[in-house]
Amino acid sequence: MESMIWRLTIIIRMFEEERAEGEAIGEARGRAEAVLDLLTEKGPVPEELREEISAQRELSILRQWLKLAARVRTTDEFQDRMQSVDTDS
């Protein structure tokens, strides 16, 4: 009985970790989409840049990119300045 409870506890923990990871990925995707939405208003977003933003999972970087996307005038300016955001964090 004790080993069954132990196994169930492990399964529950694994499930909770996977759920939390899924939530974090979902939040990152949402932030990446927000960055891309803002950039699209400033001009065409090159596919390479779109892929880099979509692949980013670090929420702190995405948060900074979102703020940067709101401040820049062009996607080129964003692309030039986004690397400094990566190193500042």
Image: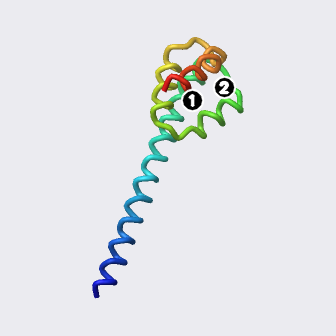
Answer with the quarter of the image where residue 6 lies: bottom left
In front: 33, or 28?
28
Real-space Cα separation, disc 2 to disc 1, in angstroms = 8 Å
Residue 36: which numbered mark, if any?
1
Residue at 52% over, 25% down: 65
Report the label total: 2
Label 1 element class:
helix
Residue at 30% over, 80% down: 5
What is the crowding at mark 2: few (fewer than 14 residues within 10 Å), some, or many (at least 20)? some
Residue 45: which numbered mark, if any?
2
Answer with the quarter of the image where residue 9 lies: bottom left
Q: Position of residue 87 (x, y in %)?
A: 55, 24
User: Vertical placement of 66 versus 77: above or below?
Assistant: below
Q: Are marks 2 and 1 in contact (CB under 8 Å)?
A: yes
Label 2 element class:
loop
Q: Position of residue 26 (x, y in %)?
A: 47, 46
